[in-house]
Amino acid sequence: MVEKTPILDFFTYIFLITGILIVGFPIIYSLIAATQTLEDVSRVPMPLVPGDQFFVNMKQAWSRGDLGTQIMNSFLMATGITVGKIAVSILGAFSIVYFDYRFRAVAFASVFCTLMLPVEVRIMPTYEVAANVLGPVQSIWEFCHLNDIVSWFTGNDFEISLNWSLLDSYTGLILPLVASATCTFLFRQFFLTVPEELCEAAKMDGASPMTFFRKILLPLSRTNIAALVVIEFVYGYNQYLWPLLITTNPKMTTAVIGLQNLIPQADDLPEWNLALGAAVLVMLPPVLVVLFMQRWFVKGLIEREK
Amino acid sequence: MIKRSFFKSRYLPYFLILPQVIVTLTFFYWPAFQGLMQSFLLSDPFGRQSKFVWFYNYIELFSDPLYLKSILITFVFSLSVAIVSLSLGLFIATMANRALRATALVRTLLIWPYAVAPAISGILWLFLLHPSYGIVALGIKNVFGMNWNPVLNGTDAMVMITMASAWKQISYNFVFFMAGMQAIPKSLIEAAAIDGASPLRRFWSITFPLLSPTFFFLSVMNIIYSFFETFGVIHTVTQGGPGGSTNILVYKVYQDGFVGLNMGSSSAQSVILMSLIILITVIQFRFVEKKVQYTG
């Protein structure tokens, strides 16, 4: 601090502690609610002294919400998206930065423009693609009247119908979300700051592009990758709209969506202790990842937006 | 931009970028194109036939009072979320920046709501603001002496989803404001202090103007967040109700398309949202160029 301002300092800490408490309050309160009996949790106001029903509630919520399966699904989805996104983007960025080819600018622009097409603005048609991934190919095939052409050539009736549904599958949960403009940008920006000499030296030593990538670029990108792992894991785990659209089987749905079934509705028993216990449990994996990898997370968050 | 020294290879670069291109073509461009086409078509309720109707769907939309209301709601909602979360984030960051000794601890205590899914944040606030059980609801009833019922009252429901959405965003804004403040040279602040500027004066005359790029960037990000990512909050907390009072644009696309199966209208709404996000992105990138000049 620049000068001594004891009164202001005092208020600073008071405000800061109030702020932290306000931000933390929903969680603390939910945790307390998760330890109460049904009777206590529906008292107004709910007692702020934790009860002793935590494990009983958790056990019940766990089995009623099928949380084991769903958290596992969320975890697999988040991991798949993280790994897929990073792999796809780092290779794409390597191609864009370190090679000169005819469609480089086009490729870069096409990746760039996906920034403007979040899944929320193309809900229905993306669902249709997921219901049949080969639909686009089929449409193009029909548009070109290839059936007729083949029939004409072979003299027989020829019809092709392609069908591959991603609904209710891990591929469907993961694949459409692995393309990312922001990750590709981050790697591109980073690659542009890598000294030219490294590449020259590698070439002089006769390294192939992939050797250069594996032995030099990949180790240099370690911190960027760590930062993206945190951000993309949180992103993947917290997805809502996409899993909601493409999963109908409760065994395939994710935890964040499954929680909805535990919220007491108007004419149910007000079992908020179960709902909140489950909510806290489900939010735990990404929160832990952020807390334990805070340093990389903050770095990644700020770098990514540049 | 390309490196001065680069590799020459005939097929490798295409092969490397192929996965990205395939995924973007199949899941981004093709659906976007389909959506655009569908927005000019009118199908019968069974989806058997469709007719090309030019801008009929758009004209219908803009003469539909429900859609106009949804636009208004979305703007009110995103502005409220941005104002609440930006001001609280800035306030807490200013305080945290003054408490130099505990910065790391404070950051740890404030950062984690970022990792909470919007839908889960919705559940927590649903309980806090529940008309019969919520403790915050009870406080509102006692302090303001008003009847609080987000299940029946549209304004109350709007306040509820705003709180649930803004809460999680406070920590995001906090991280950026904090980073922005720590990047301001200490010498500037010290020079001002020697000239006799009070802490408040220093904040308004030095810190705040230097934070303006961060501020602008965060405003854009918060608006994008409240336009699109709050879908989970709406879906868990209000489902657009009561009486459409929290039916923001994204939720309406989902309801009309996925639930109501009105493809033409839903696609037209998607296209409008798409143009909106393109506009936001263009503004943002315009600004980024300015920011580069600004910081020299």
Image (cartoon, coloured by chain):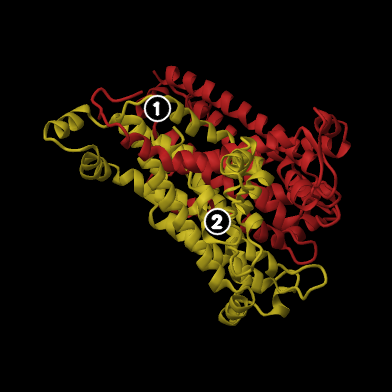
Of the two numbered discs 1 and 2 on the same chain, state the one appearing first in sequence. 1
- Judging from the image, what is the letter of the chain drawn in red? B
Q: In this view, does B72 lie above or below B142?
A: above
Q: In this view, does A65 lie above or below A28?
A: below
In percent of width and height, residue B31 lies at: 63, 40
Q: In this view, does A58 lie above or below B268?
A: below
In percent of width and height, residue A219 lies at: 24, 45
Quadrant for the N terminus of chain A in the image: top left
In percent of width and height, residue A192 lies at: 31, 29
The foreground one among A243 and B198 is A243
B261 left or right, relative to B250: right
Residue hosting label 1: A104
The answer to whether any part of residue A79 appears in the image is yes
Q: Do labels 1 and 2 share a chain?
A: yes
Residue B200: mark in rendering: none
The foreground one among A304 and A192 is A192
Q: How far apart are marks 1 and 2 (CA)?
A: 29 Å
Residue hosting label 2: A173
- Judging from the image, what is the letter of the chain drawn in yellow? A
Residue located at (76% from left, 58% from top): B137
Amino acid, disc 1? Arg
Parent chain of label 2? A
Amino acid, disc 2? Leu
Q: In this view, does B294 lie above or below A39?
A: above
A262 left or right, relative to B189: right
